[in-house]
Amino acid sequence: MAKHKNTTQKGPDVILIGAGIMSATLGVMLKELQPDLTIDIYERLDRAAAESSDAWNNAGTGHSAFCELNYTPEREDGTIDIGKAVKIAESFEQSKQFWSYLVQQGFLSDTPNFIRSIPHMSFVWEHDNVDFLRKRYDTLQQNYLFHGMHYSEDPAQLADWIPLVMRGRDPDQPVAATKMNIGTDVNFGALTRCMFTQLQKMDGVTMHFGYDVRDLWRSKTLGGWKVKVENKNDGHTSEVQTDFVFIGAGGGSLRLLEKSDIPESRGFGGFPVSGQWLKCLNRNIIEQHAAKVYGKASVGAPPMSVPHLDTRMIDGKKELLFGPYAGFSTKFLKSGSYLDLPKSIQLSNMAPMLMAGLHNISLTKYLIQQVLQSPNDRMSALREYYPDAKLEDWELEIAGQRVQVIKKDEDEGGVLEFGTEVVSATDGSIAALLGASPGASTAVSIMLTLLKTCFANKVATDEWQQKLKEMIPSYGQTLANNPELGHRLRRQTSEVLGLTLEEQTSEVTR
C-alpha cells in the first residue's frame, strides 16, 4: 500500500459513504441512540438517493415476500421452503416499526409520499406453475405473517383483481394468483431524502455532495480510519480522520472495501447486472391497473429480473412499469465507469470470480439474450402479463445498476449470492454493505445487525437497549413465532403510516 501523509486533525466520530437508504437508516439510528455523535456523509453525486435508492432505479416494492416467488423455492421433493420468505416478511415489519417511530417523533412527515398500500400479487399460468403456487399458498398459511392472503384459480375472480392481465388471455389457459391487500409501494428515494433532510438539521451532522471517496486506510497515529475525499467540482483532495466508517455506496462499495485492505474483504467479488423497464405512457391504461403482479423468473435469470407488472406512485403520480429486463455492463453504478469491474479484480478474488462464472453459465447466456432483445422481444415478454399491450403505449426506461456478491466457497471455489451481506472488520471500526435485493426494504434489520457487530459494547448497555426497543418494539423478539405481538404491531404501524389494516382471514377460490 502506498504511504500517506498523516494528519493530526480529529474528524467526525462516524463517516457514512453514500447517501442512499442504508446510510440514511444508519445515520438516523446512531443519532437517536447517541445524539452527541458527529457524522459526516459523503456522496459523489449532487443529491441523495440518486443511484439504487431512486424510485426509477429500484422495484419500489415493500419486499415482504407476499408476491416474490423466488423467496419460496421448491425443494427437490416438491415441498416449498418458506424460510427466507418468513425472514424477509419479519424484516419488513421491523422497517415499518422504525418508520412509524420516526413519524410519531415528527422526524418524518407526509407519509403518503413514501409509502402507500397496494395489493401484492403472484400470477402464474400452465398446470405445473399453478400446482406450485397452490402449494406455496398452502405452506405460507402455516405462518400468521401471511394470513389474509387470497388464492384463486377462477378466471372471473382474477379478471376482477387484475383486468389488464386477464383481458385477451386464452380462456382455456390454466391460471392462478394470490393477493395480499396489505402489500405496499415504497418510494425509497423520497424516504431517503426526507431522512437526510432531517439529519442535516441535527447538531454534528454534515453532508458533502459532489465528493468522491478516493481511498481509505487505518490511521496509525490517531486510531480509526483516514478517508481521502476529492471535491469533484474543483479537484481538491483532503483527508478526514474518523473512528468508524460505513461504506453504503451501492455498487461502489466493493472497490472501497477492497481499498480498506481488511482481511475480511479478501475473496469478495462483484457481478454487475443492469436493468431496464418498460414504462407505460397511456394514462388510461395506467388507471386500469392497481397491483404489483409478480411472476416466475425465466430459467437462469437473476432474482432482480423476476418479471412484474408494477403500479408505482412516483413524485405523486401513478405510474405503470413492466420488467425489469436484465442486461450486462461493467459499471458498478449507473453513473459509474466501465472500468469498475476490471479494477475490482484482485489476486484474492480472481479464483472465486472465475469459479462463480463457471457455475453460472446459464446466467451468462440469459444476460446475452437480454442484451440482444429487440423492442418486439420485450413486448412479447410484456404480453405474457398483459396480452393486449401495444408497442406505442410503452417506452424503455433505464433502471439502476446492481452488483451481486461473489464470495469464496470451500466446496464450489466461488459462489454468486443474490442477497445482501455486511462485511466488517474484526474490531468493528469499518463495515460495508454488498449486494442488492431485498436490501432497501430490509434496511432496518440490516442496520440492527451492523450495530450489534460494530457497536457491540454500546448495544449491550441498558440505555441503547431501551432506545432500540422504543424505535423498534419487536427488537430482541422473534416476530415469526409471536402472532399476538405481530398482529398488534401491524395494526399500530398501519394506523401510523396510513396503510390498509390487516385482514385476518385467508380465502381460496377454485
Image (cartoon, rainbow, N blue to C red):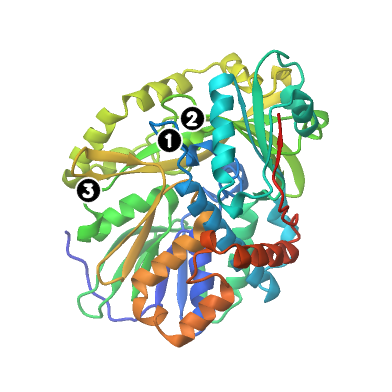
Q: Residue at x 59, y 46 (%)?
A: 141
Task: Name which of mark 1 and mark 2 comes first in the sequence.
Answer: 1
Q: Quadrant of the C terminus?
A: top right
| Camera-nearest residue between 124 and 451 | 124
The number of numbered discs placed on residues in the rendered structure image is 3
Q: CA distance from mark 3 to mark 1?
A: 20 Å
Under circle 3, the secondary element is loop
Decide: few, some or many residues near mark 2? Use Cα within 10 Å; few <14, some 14-19, many ≥20.
Answer: many
| Camera-nearest residue between 122 and 369 | 122
Numbered label attached to residue 326: 2
Q: Residue at x 76, y 45 (%)?
A: 317
- Evaluate whether residue 260 shows in this view: yes
Write down the residue under mark 3: 267
Q: Residue at x 63, y 59 (%)?
A: 191
Q: Is residue 403 above or below residue 486?
A: above
Say what amino acid the circle numbered 1 marks: Val
Q: Quadrant of residue 238?
A: bottom left
Say what amino acid the circle numbered 3 marks: Gly
Q: Residue at x 42, y 23 (%)?
A: 366
Say what amino acid the circle numbered 2 marks: Ala
Residues marked 1 and 2 touching at CB (< 8 Å): yes
Task: Name which of mark 3 and mark 1 comes first in the sequence.
Answer: 3
